[in-house]
Amino acid sequence: MPNFTLQIDLEPFEALDQLALLARQDYNLGGSGDWFGEFRRGLHGVYARLYGVQRRYSEVHAWLPRVRTPSETEYHLASVMFQMDSALECLTFALNAIGWVVLPADFRDITDVNALRLIGPRDIIGDPTSTPPTPPLQSGYEKVFPETQLGWQNQAQLIARIRDLHDVSKHRQTIYVGGKFITGDPPDGFFEALGFPAESDRKYYLLRPMAEIILQTDPKSPMAERTSNPGQQSELLEDLVPSFAALIDATGKFALGDAQSNVPLKEKRLQR
């Protein structure tokens, strides 16, 4: 049976949190605008969203007491898309807070409620599809988080895909178009734990978890303009989510390295 447990490395983010705590001290950058509070709450938002991705991704593929329907699959899908998109939003919010205390003029002002509303991944990668195209906040991210920005720009298509699927699942319609069930038998004792005797009709098709979930190819296009793709060309959730996890892993390493190189510290260790 395939393993749908999603592993995400949080150690670089924990090290970034410790670096930010050091930067917050009065003998370093201080606490202007409570930037550290904004950073840490953003980072904790990331942790919560990543937990949500891991849990919902596992549950939609797990043997659980359920009556399997397309609506139940879509429920998990919509949650996974929210968690992934929101993780990127929270991560941008956290990085913006660090960037602001280093170069206030080159990042969104965390003391301005209107500026706070504008913080998002497009600050890092821009939006070439908007009219006119929106550039990234190059003056800030190029100086403080250059490797992070480059990593996200290289994955701009993945980020845009996640955001589009979340937007459609949130505001418009379903994004689940089909898939495959897991084959084989459930874990020993599964049906007995549900109170089904060994000789009963267990209706596997109602309880089987998903093995592959096919996503809409062009979810924002009108239905009349969509083209059907052969199944082997359709994108699977099982490809998208691991790609997201790889992006998060790389981002943690990039963001930590950028902060170590570009956040100025007079004192390199916490003073007791």
Image (cartoon, rainbow, N blue to C red):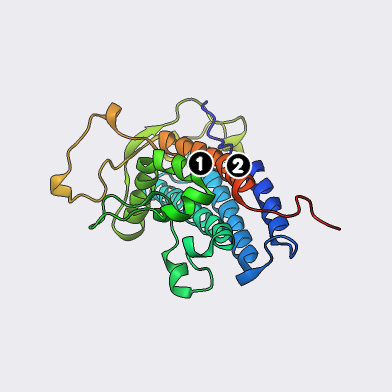
Is 179 or 150 nearer to us in this picture? 150
Residue 211 can be seen in this image: no
Q: Dot 1: few (<14), some (14–19), or many (≥20) neighbours within 10 Å? A: many
Instruction: Residue 206 in the image: state x and y as whole percent.
Output: 42, 40
Question: Label 2 is placed on what type of residue?
Answer: Gly
**Mark 2 highlights which residue?**
257
* Gap in angstroms between the C-alphas marked 2 and 1: 8 Å
Please identify the quarter of the rendering in which residue 64 is found: top right
Please identify the quarter of the rendering in which residue 168 is found: bottom left
Eyeballing the image, is 11 above or below 110? above
Is 100 or 78 nearer to us in this picture? 100
Question: Which residue is the extreme one toward the left?
Answer: 224
251 left or right of 36? left
Q: Residue at x 64, y 42 (%)?
A: 12
Instruction: Residue 91 in the image: state x and y as whole percent.
Output: 53, 53
Check contact, mark 2 vs mark 1: CB within 8 A: yes
Q: Residue at x 60, y 71 (%)?
A: 33
Eyeballing the image, is 183 above or below 84? above
Question: Label 1 is placed on what type of residue?
Answer: Glu
Q: Earlier in the sequence, mark 2 or mark 1?
A: 1
132 left or right of 141? left
Instruction: Residue 73 in the image: state x and y as whole percent.
Output: 41, 46
103 left or right of 157? right
Q: Residue at x 79, y 54 (%)?
A: 270
Instruction: Indicate the secondary structure of the residue bearing disc 1.
Output: helix
**Mark 1 highlights which residue?**
147
Instruction: Indicate the secondary structure of the residue bearing disc 2.
Output: helix
